[in-house]
Image (spheres, helix red, strand yellow):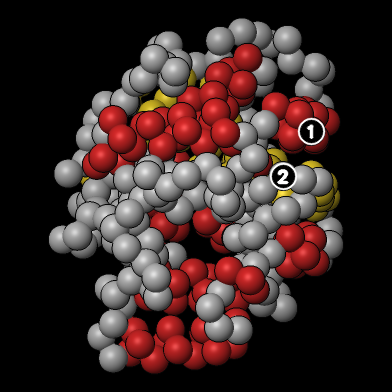
């Protein structure tokens, strides 16, 4: 069931002044969103913040505060099938989407119903991982809403080490399994477990123990926010979307400046793949943050500072106090 509130913990308070609600997707699925106004000036417009697979608004409260201090209003949402938005399968823990075009439609509804009517321009997109893939899709569409785009470890290629088989074999097997009705089956090794009981040691997303434990504590307090492993249906949709971005005509259709932040020790997305992708785009630049794992914005302070320094430089912002 979708929820129209935000979960608060003592170590993860809701930033003040939140407007929270549910909007309806084109197919009627409820999608949770939240909006904040800037907490100080000068006012710089709105950052539209988009998380990755399994993520939820509460995980980004710290990032919301960072952005508001820089003079930005913030608008964010939970993608369909995760967080406080509606789920598409009876088992709410299964990560599933039929096609990333569904995410495109949800993004369109979010921009038209929430951002454009009520948030101050100009609009900047800040997206992580799967969210970065979706925003890259929008960047090639006519009339892109965003003046600039910042991407954290965007999902343009998977790290080969994260795949049980090679990429070519993974594509072939995934298409075959889905063709025979297996789109709702977990990928090998997958389960309902979000990871809230997994130890910090050996995790692939961050070197920051406190932030890792904080994010798991959110799901412990509100299990309905959690999401398990991906299904073959999600994997097929993701692989197809990544291939779409690598089409020959894609770079010529992108006319918005993009900053790619690459995690030097990413074991989920391919750091080399992101770098190769970025150099194809005329208006793109990229930075590599050594020692960072996949979730750069959830990393330890010294690595986050590198990210925010690049963000500020890209957007022409003086040092945020």
Image quarter hosting the N terminus: top left
Identify the secondary structure beneath mark 1: helix
Real-space CA distance between mark 1 and mark 2, rounded to the nearest whole angstrom: 10 Å
Closer to the camera in the image, 82 or 170? 170
Q: Does 252 appear above or below 196?
A: below
**Labelled disc at residue 86:** none
* Residue for badge 2: 292
Give the residue displayed 41% in from the left and 57% down from the top: 103
* Side (left or right) of 288 relative to 61: right
Identify the secondary structure beneath mark 2: loop
Whole-percent x, y for residue 178 in the image:
34, 84
For the residue carrying disc 2, how many other residues have a C-alpha within 10 Å: few (<14), some (14-19), or many (20+)?
many
**Labelled disc at residue 306:** 1
- Which mark is first along the chain, 2 or 1? 2
Q: Does 312 appear above or below 166?
A: above
Whole-percent x, y for residue 250 in the image:
68, 70
Q: How many marks?
A: 2
Give the residue displayed 74% in from the left and 34% down from the top: 303
Whole-percent x, y for residue 282 in the image:
83, 58
* Side (left or right) of 126 relative to 98: right
Determine contact: label 1, label 2, CB under 8 Å: yes
Whole-percent x, y for residue 234 in the image:
40, 68
For the residue carrying disc 1, how many other residues have a C-alpha within 10 Å: few (<14), some (14-19), or many (20+)?
some
Q: Quadrant of residue 17?
A: top left
Image quarter hosting the C terminus: top right
* Side (left or right) of 7 relative to 250: left
Q: Would residue 316 be visible to someone looking at this image?
A: yes
Badge nearest the viewer, 1 or 2 = 2
Give the residue displayed 50% in from the left and 50% down from the top: 52
Give the residue displayed 54% in from the left and 24% down from the top: 62
Q: Would residue 144 be visible to someone looking at this image?
A: no
């Amino acid at each position: 069931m979708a929820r129209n509130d935000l979960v608060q913990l003592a170590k993860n308070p809701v930033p003040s002044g939140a407007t929270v609600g549910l909007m309806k997707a084109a197919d009627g699925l409820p999608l949770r969103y939240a909006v904040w106004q800037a907490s100080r000036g000068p006012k710089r417009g709105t950052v539209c913040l988009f998380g990755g697979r399994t993520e939820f608004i509460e995980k980004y409260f710290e990032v919301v505060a960072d952005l508001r201090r820089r003079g930005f209003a913030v608008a964010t949402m939970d993608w369909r099938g995760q967080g406080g938005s509606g789920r598409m399968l009876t088992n709410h823990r299964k990560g599933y989407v039929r096609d990333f075009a569904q995410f495109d439609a949800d993004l369109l509804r979010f921009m038209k119903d929430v951002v454009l009517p009520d948030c101050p321009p100009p609009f900047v997109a800040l997206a992580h991982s799967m969210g970065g893939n979706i925003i890259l899709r929008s960047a090639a569409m006519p009339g892109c809403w965003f003046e600039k785009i910042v991407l954290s470890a965007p999902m343009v290629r998977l790290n080969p080490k994260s795949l049980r088989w090679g990429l070519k074999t993974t594509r072939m097997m995934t298409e075959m399994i889905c063709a025979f009705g297996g789109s709702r089956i977990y990928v090998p090794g997958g389960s309902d477990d979000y990871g809230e009981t997994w130890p910090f040691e050996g995790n692939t997303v961050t070197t920051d123990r406190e932030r890792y434990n904080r994010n798991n504590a959110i799901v412990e307090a509100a299990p309905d926010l959690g999401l398990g492993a991906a299904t073959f249906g999600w994997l097929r949709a993701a692989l197809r979307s990544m291939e779409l971005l690598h089409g020959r005509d894609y770079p010529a259709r992108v006319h918005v400046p993009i900053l790619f932040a690459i995690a030097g020790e990413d074991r989920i997305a391919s750091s080399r793949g992101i770098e190769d992708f970025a150099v194809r785009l005329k208006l793109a630049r990229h930075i590599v943050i050594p020692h960072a794992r996949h979730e750069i914005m959830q990393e330890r302070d010294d690595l986050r500072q590198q990210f925010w320094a690049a963000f500020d430089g890209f957007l022409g912002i003086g040092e945020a106090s």
